[in-house]
Image (spheres, rainbow, N blue to C red):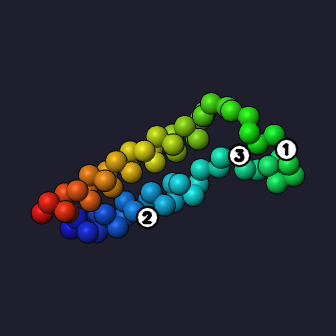
Amino acid sequence: MLTIIQLVLAVLVIVSILLQQRGSGLSGAFGGEGGVYSTRRGVEKILFRGTVVVAVLFFGVSIARLLL
């Protein structure tokens, strides 16, 4: 059971990391300002926090599998 949970969490971590767009977009492709710091808002903030939560869960399940 833990193996299946770990597999699902691994896929979720990969997908959530790939969905994050940091410094990309059309302006980044043409040399626009990509290095400007901006705060996360809206969906980007939710996606970031979700990634952190899923990564912590993945770590917890991995430790549980190691100990059991």
The residue mark sitting in front, 1 or 2, is 1
* Most foreground residue, 35 or 49: 35
Residue at the outermost left position? 68
Residue type, label 3 = Gly
The residue carrying mark 3 is 23
Q: Where does residue 61 sit, x and y in percent of width and height?
A: 25, 57
Badge 1 or badge 3: first in the primary sequence: 3
> Is the Cβ of the residue at disc 3 closer than 8 Å to that at disc 2?
no
Q: Is residue 62 left or right of residue 68?
A: right
Badge 1 or badge 2: first in the primary sequence: 2
Which element carries disc 1, helix, strand or loop?
loop
Q: What distance separates the C-alpha of mark 1 from that of mark 2?
A: 32 Å
Q: What distance separates the C-alpha of mark 1 from that of mark 3?
A: 10 Å
Residue type, label 1 = Gly
Which element carries disc 2, helix, strand or loop?
helix
> Is the Cβ of the residue at disc 1 closer than 8 Å to that at disc 2?
no
Q: What distance separates the C-alpha of mark 3 from that of mark 2?
A: 23 Å
Is the C terminus in the top left, top right, bottom left or bottom right quadrant?
bottom left
* Most foreground residue, 39 or 34: 34
The residue carrying mark 2 is 11
Is the N terminus in the top left, top right, bottom left or bottom right quadrant?
bottom left
Q: Is residue 6 left or right of residue 43?
A: left
Badge 3 or badge 2: first in the primary sequence: 2
Density class for disc 3 (Cα within 10 Å; few <14, some 14-19, many ≥20) is: some
Density class for disc 1 (Cα within 10 Å; few <14, some 14-19, many ≥20) is: few
The residue carrying mark 1 is 32
Residue occupying the point 39% across, 51% down: 55
